Amino acid sequence: MKIEQITLHHLRMPLVAHFETSFGRIFERDCILIEIQSEGLTGWGECVADRDPGYCYETSGTAWHILMDFVIPQTLGQDIADAVDFQQRVANIRGHQLAKAGVEMALWDLLGQRQGQSLCQLFGGIKTQVPVGVSVGLQDSPEILLQTVEKYLTDGYRRVKLKIKPGRDFGDTALVRRAFPQLQLQVDANSAYTLETARALLPLDELGLLLIEQPLFEDDIWDHASLQKLLKTPVCLDESIVSPRHARYALEMQACRVINIKPARCGGLAQGIEIHEMCQQAGIPVWCGGMLETNIGRASNLALASLPNFSLPGDISASARYYHEDLTEETFTLNADSTITVPDRPGLGVTVVRSQVEKFALARVTF
Ligand code: OSB
Ligand code: MG
């Protein structure tokens, strides 16, 4: 695929409701869209770096810089065969996985359109609908927490993830568990604990949780192995798994029993697929995480989650959970059985509405 033109769009979109994690509260979400023109086709990718470096060190600012000054000069005008070829060309750029993944997604979109195949087909996906859940941020009071969870259950979600942090862990989780004894429930600490303070998480073992996500430091797989030994509940890693190598370290150290695959965090879909295969062989279930994507990134997540070892519900909620207005003609809705249908048209299988992109754009640059 000859890369003829690349346009970056920096967007800021207001969320339907604020989202609070252990690293802060946001009311709006940044993203960078990567639009690539190649041989009469247009491919779109979404870089999920946010304005602040709370989840990881990358921001919309660092991603813009890495894309403009390094990734684009190395790809523009080149003839790129596929995602693996792209990964090799940018391997000299250390880290900055979210930035690279945004471009890689656009290349997959182009590849699929060229071959008349959906991403699901290109990846070897086997599901036409994937089970999903909803990620519930920290709420201002126990009453609001229960109301929020109840609203999502009424919407039809059958799996709920609660954000936790020190002082807001067992109390919140036990409250929801008491109100909904049968609910598929899990928690996510976003690296808010140390091995010492994580003792507060031991009572969670009695609440029948699916998993406890990323309790300890993002760069610390070792201590997660010590913590997993103290818990019956599976530890699940998110932030710590920034490459297939890190997935291998985690499996060898028995640092977790589940992995949350966010392809962007690992530098792209190619690595997401690789980790999926590695976990399948090791008997470790995976699920697809979310980064409050627009429908562009959501289409990509749905395709990935159609692979066989994505055996737990993903953080891929319906479009309406995130934004009042999204960027594509298509809207993703929740099916009655708490699944979302995987796009089946070529490439990402979504049609981007340019006027919507313009509406939320803070900056744009074309190469
Ligand atoms: O840790 O899974 C996370 C959103 C932004 C950054 C990190 C996380 C999240 C979520 C939201 O939990 C998942 C979603 O997109 O629905
Ligand atoms: Mg997480």
Image (cartoon, rainbow, N blue to C red):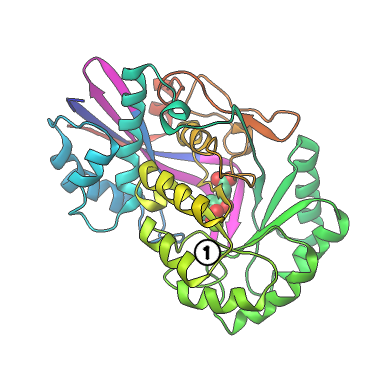
Is residue 41 in the magenta section?
Answer: yes
Rendered-image quarter of ligand 2: bottom right
Question: In the shown orientation, is residue 296 left or right of residue 192?
Answer: left
**Prevailing SS of the magenta stretch:** strand
Judge whether 337 appears above or below 264 on screen: above
Residue 26 visible (yes or no): no
Question: In the shown orientation, is residue 136 left or right of residue 348?
Answer: right
Secondary structure found at label 1: loop
Residue located at (70% from left, 70% from top): 232
Quadrant into which the C terminus falls: top left
Find the residue positioned furthest to the front: 281
Quadrant into which the N terminus falls: top left
Residue located at (17% from left, 47% from top): 70
Residue at mark 1: 23
Residue located at (74% from left, 70% from top): 204
Which amino acid type is shown beneath numbered disc 1?
Phe
Residue situated in front as seen by the camera: 112 or 353: 112
Q: Which residues are magenta?
A: 14-43
- Res 316 → quadrant: top right
Residue situated in front as seen by the camera: 106 or 281: 281
- Res 341 → quadrant: top right
Q: Position of residue 326 (x, y in %)?
A: 52, 29
